[in-house]
Amino acid sequence: MTNTVDRDSRGPANTASSYGFAAPPSIESFETLGVHRESSVLFVDIAAPPMNLLGPAMVRDLVFFIQQAEADRGLKVIVFRSADPDYFIPHVDVTLIQQYREEAAKLTGEASLALMFRHLSASRLVTIAQIEGRVRAAGSEFVLACDMRFAALDSAIFAQPEPAFGAPPGAGGIQHLVRLMGRGRALEVMLGAEDFNAELAERYGWINRALPASELKDFVQKLAHRIAKFPASGLATVKDRVNAIALATADDFRRDSDLFGEAARTPESQRRFKAAFGSGFQTRSAEMDLAGLIGSLED
């Protein structure tokens, strides 16, 4: 399902116009997203080998995708999935922080994943994350920005491990997790930097439901199509009123983003990132157990 077309030089695969979008002429397809439309529902498969790290290409694709989706008045619901059974989005590519922030600015005018994700939360579109595999750090913050989250009991793993590197979550994790879980559990999740399976994530409120993998796809598909049958105006009004109660202000997201950026540049954080890379950080095999990797780092 992955489109592997670069905007500049490579020939088209699935064109943006085939999704029903009014696409800018320069946009031919997405490098890291595969898109399938069923009536008023879009199913989006994230595919960025080798392990779906959130880097400049994925952020660029998400920005253009969100812009196109919001411009399509016939679209009501988006379901985000992963083409990789082991990794949904494990975290950002920490070697390319400045580059992916520059791409995020093309949506909101600010070089911040936090503001980009908040834009998605505030959108009129209903977004659902169908989660299999590992979703940590900014990956967790991406699914938290979605309106609903459903995960596979068999494979989904969640973590918010930034404090293990000396930084706070910077793309909305603090704002969402405290509201969803309460103070004590949110502190346990972030300060402990452990992996949580889907069953525990459901119990803590991280996700809506954990289901067997064999049931997950059909459940999400039926829910997405059910929601898409209802009037768009009603869906947007409900989202707007719920967000007025539960979605933190842009300033709160902006502050967390700034704190993450500042902390990630400190000598302490840089030493811990270097040590993590020495132990296999950002490699597919080592990050199957990221909690074990960061727990073994020396101060």
Image (spheres, rainbow, N blue to C red):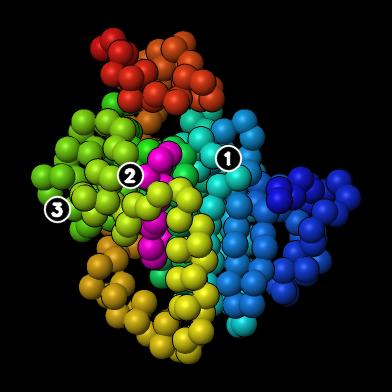
- Amino acid type at circle 2 is Ala
Quick one: 254 or 57, which is closer to the camera? 57
**Vertical arrangement, residue 103 with respect to residue 280, above or below:** below
As drawn, which residue projects farthest toward the left?
184
Q: Taking the image as drawn, is residue 161 in sight?
A: yes
User: Which residue lies at the image location 41% right of the left edge and 88% below the top edge?
Assistant: 234
Q: In which quarter of the view is residue 200 placed? A: top left
Earlier in the chain: of badge 2 and badge 3, it is 3
Alpha carbon separation for disc pair 3 and 1: 31 Å
The answer to whether residue 181 is left or right of residue 96 is: left
Span highlighted in magenta in the image: 145-156
Earlier in the chain: of badge 3 and badge 1, it is 1
Q: In which quarter of the view is residue 241 placed? A: bottom left
- Amino acid type at circle 3 is Gly
User: Which residue lies at the image location 31% right of the left edge and 72% below the top edge?
Assistant: 243
Q: Tell me, yes or no, whether the two marked residues, 3 and 1, touch with CB atoms within 8 Å.
A: no
Name the residue that disc number 2 marks.
198
Asked which secondary structure carries label 1, the reply is loop
Label 2 crowd bin: few (<14), some (14–19), many (20+), radius 10 Å: many
The answer to whether residue 11 is left or right of residue 223 is: right
- Amino acid type at circle 1 is Asp
Q: Is residue 150 magenta?
A: yes
Name the residue that disc number 3 marks.
182
Label 1 crowd bin: few (<14), some (14–19), many (20+), radius 10 Å: some
Q: Is residue 233 magenta?
A: no
Alpha carbon separation for disc pair 2 and 3: 18 Å
The image position of residue 4, as x and y in percent, is 76, 45
The image position of residue 190, as x and y in percent, is 24, 37
Quick one: 242 or 97, which is closer to the camera? 242
Quick one: 39 or 23, which is closer to the camera? 39
**Vertical arrangement, residue 207 with respect to residue 55, above or below:** below
Quick one: 11 or 35, which is closer to the camera? 35
